[in-house]
Amino acid sequence: MKFLFKVLLLIMLTCSTAFAREIIVVTYNTHQDLALLTREILMNHFIIPKRLITLKQTQEPCKKVDNPIMHLCLNEERELLLVELKKEIITKSFGIFLLTTNK
């Protein structure tokens, strides 16, 4: 999982289309404290800049929203769930990472 977040950070640096949309979206209904904790973990443990993480309060937090690269949600049972992950973007970015590091 840590590797996945490192690759997401690489996306920001290498993919110009990544700037046109939200990168990581964390949605919640009533558990704002857990959403803030999730953002802090992403920032401190996975070294993801705060500007790449969007917190959104919605009535249906685990329903797909917009077009983020990663969508996490906090359900009513206080569980963090992965709703959506754009694997093709991560795969392309990882390919670029391999090409630039194997010289």
Image (cartoon, rainbow, N blue to C red):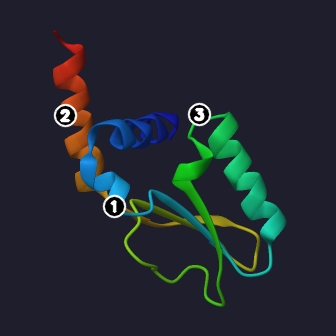
- Residue lying farthest to the right in this orientation: 33
Q: Give the residue pinned by disc 1.
A: 20
Q: Give the residue pinned by disc 3.
A: 47
Residue 39, which numbered label?
none
Describe residue 32's horizontal placement relative to residue 10 as left or right.
right
Amino acid under disc 3: Ile
- The alpha-carbon separation of the residues under discs 3 and 2 comes to 21 Å
For the residue labelled by badge 1, is the local secondary structure a helix, a strand or a loop?
helix
Describe residue 48's horizontal placement relative to residue 19 as left or right.
right
Residue visible at 56% across and 40% down?
48
Q: Is residue 10 above or below residue 87?
A: above
- The alpha-carbon separation of the residues under discs 3 and 1 comes to 21 Å
Q: How many marks?
A: 3
The picture places residue 53, in percent across and down from the top left corner, at 57, 55
The picture places residue 57, in percent across and down from the top left corner, at 68, 79
Give whichever of discs 1 and 2 has the lower sequence position. 1
Amino acid under disc 1: Ala
Residue visible at 34% across and 42% down?
11
Q: Give the residue pinned by disc 2.
A: 95
Residue 34 falls in image quadrant: bottom right
The picture places residue 51, in percent across and down from the top left corner, at 57, 50
In terms of depth relative to the viewer, which is nearer, 30 or 20?
Answer: 20
Cβ atoms under marks 3 and 2 closer than 8 Å: no
Cβ atoms under marks 1 and 2 closer than 8 Å: no
For the residue labelled by badge 3, is the local secondary structure a helix, a strand or a loop?
loop
